[in-house]
Image (cartoon, rainbow, N blue to C red):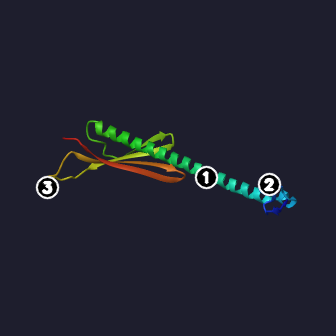
Amino acid sequence: MRQSRKRWSSGVTECWSNDGTTPLLHYSITPSRRRRSVGFALYEVLIGVTIFAIGVVALGRAVENCLNASALSAEEGRVREILWNRMAEIQTTPGRPDVSPKPIKIDSGYGKIVLIQKTAPANLTEPDGNRLTGVNLVTLTAKWEKGGVTQAKQIEFYVYRPG
């Protein structure tokens, strides 16, 4: 009856039964191995906390950028809406549009917007050379300030008034 023992580096001791045919495995943790596997070292914890903090800061900046982009988009949408509403007013009002440029101050939820309207004869000609009369080119310009920088958006359209 032979009993052999073989010790592996993982801490497993291999023993054989008395008849020599059945292996028996005994797990034992050596004292040096026990000290290594008890917990994380301080540097591992600090590295983990640093990686987590960097991720949180990056996520915060991404959210801030999304909020800024959303605010800018809403502001430009409001300016576009003001320009389109004024264009609809001009197109539906009977008679010739005002010729003199007059600024209109509008208080939107994002600050003061100055709307400037300019009207000039379009000076369009037909393919045969005849000049079209009664067609005016209207230019609407919206100006506002965002962060100390002047912003502007402009649309041009034609208005036909026979006469």
Q: Amino acid at mark 3?
A: Gly
Choose between 109 and 101: the one closer to the eye. 109
78 vs 20, left or right, is: left
Q: Nearer the viewer, mark 2 or mark 3?
A: 2
Q: Give the residue pinned by disc 3.
A: 129
Instruction: Determine which of the numbered discs, if any, sits on residue 61 in the image.
Output: 1
Q: Residues within 10 Å of mark 2 (few under 14, many from 20)?
A: few
Q: Nearer the viewer, mark 1 or mark 2?
A: 2
* Marks 2 and 3 in Cβ contact (< 8 Å): no
Point out the image quarter for the C terminus: top left
Q: Secondary structure at mark 3?
A: loop
Q: Residues within 10 Å of mark 3 (few under 14, many from 20)?
A: few
Q: Amino acid at mark 2?
A: Leu
Q: Secondary structure at mark 2?
A: strand
The part of the image, by quadrant, that contains residue 94 is: top left
The mark that comes first in sequence, 2 or 3, is 2
- Farthest residue in the right direction? 31
The mark that comes first in sequence, 1 or 2, is 2
Point out the image quarter for the N terminus: bottom right
The mark that comes first in sequence, 3 or 1, is 1
Q: Amino acid at mark 1?
A: Arg
User: Can you give x and y, in whole percent of width and height, for residue 140 in the image?
Assistant: 36, 47
Q: Give the residue pinned by disc 2.
A: 24
User: Can you give x and y, in whole percent of width and height, for residue 3 in the image?
Assistant: 84, 60
Instruction: Determine which of the numbered discs, if any, sits on residue 47 in the image.
Output: none
User: Can you give x and y, in whole percent of width and height, for residue 62 in the image?
Assistant: 58, 51
Choose between 22 and 58: the one closer to the eye. 22
